[in-house]
Amino acid sequence: MKLKRPLFICFIAMAVCAGESFAGFTCGGPLKSSQVEGFKTFFDPDFSPSLSHMGGAVAPENMSKVVSAAELKNLEVEKPAVAASAKLDSSGAKSLQDWLNANANDTIPGWFSTTLGIVSPAAWIGLAADVAIQLINVAGDAGRIKLANIAGTVSEGGFVGVVHRIATRDRGGRSYIWNYVYTAELNGKKITFLLAVCSADVVVK
């Protein structure tokens, strides 16, 4: 995968593998792995992609999403479903604002929304896994926005969420894809901001 900025965060627990991608598990975006881990704690309970160690060394390439046939049916959908959503409390708002300011000059894509809340943009619907993973690199219909500008929108009560789905890869097989998102008003427009995209191989048990 190509990134506009060569920052590919591959993590299992708190280990960081910058600039690499693995067959099993990858994440991309400007947030550091510790910040992504912190983002998971905004939800009750904490969000987890629930990956499983498939043998060998405990490393990203050996972590996959194991699902039953029933779970596959629920997740292999056109539109990413909401896996977790929350309104930021004062502590969460400060943390998110600090993380965005710490990466102030980086940019992420945004998509215009008709509502403040966690909803997958229409442009995310029906994408093959290979394309969905690259969303972090594109310019959404709202363009690419500096994190410093997004930080100025963060306040208590702001909406954060995780959306997820299973999609087919062009080369065969399936990927479980989950996106970390934040929705706010910027310059009078409601926008869904894509903070990070993560992907793991799927194993059907």
Image (tube, rainbow, N blue to C red):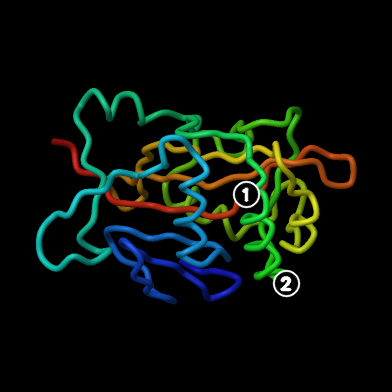
Q: Amino acid at mark 2?
A: Asn
Instruction: Tell me where residue 118 sits by quadrant.
Output: top right
Identify which residue is drawn at 21% across, 41% down.
Answer: 66
In the rendered view, tell whether residue 48 sits above or below residue 80: below
Residue 112: image location, x then y, percent? 75, 39
- Farthest residue, direction front: 91
Identify which residue is drawn at 79% across, 37% down.
Answer: 190
Determine the secondary structure under disc 2: loop
Give the numbered dot on residue 91.
Answer: 1
Give the numbered dot on residue 105.
Answer: 2
Give the numbered dot on residue 101.
Answer: none
Q: Amino acid at mark 1?
A: Ser
What is the crowding at mark 1: few (fewer than 14 residues within 10 Å), some, or many (at least 20)? few
- Farthest residue, direction left: 55
Residues under labels 2 and 1: Cα distance? 23 Å
- Residue mark closest to the camera, 2 vs 1: 1
In the rendered view, tell whether residue 144 sits above or below residue 40: below
What is the crowding at mark 2: few (fewer than 14 residues within 10 Å), some, or many (at least 20)? few
Residue 141: image location, x then y, percent? 74, 46
In the rendered view, tell whether residue 54 sits above or below residue 191: below
For the N terminus, the quadrant is bottom left
Nearer the observer, 152 or 54: 152
Residue 8: image location, x then y, percent? 46, 69
- Left or right: 41, with 205 as reference point: right
For marks 2 and 1 on the same chain, the one whose residue lies earlier in the sequence: 1
Residue 86: image location, x then y, percent? 57, 34
Identify which residue is drawn at 70% across, 36% down.
Answer: 157
- Left or right: 83, with 105 as reference point: left
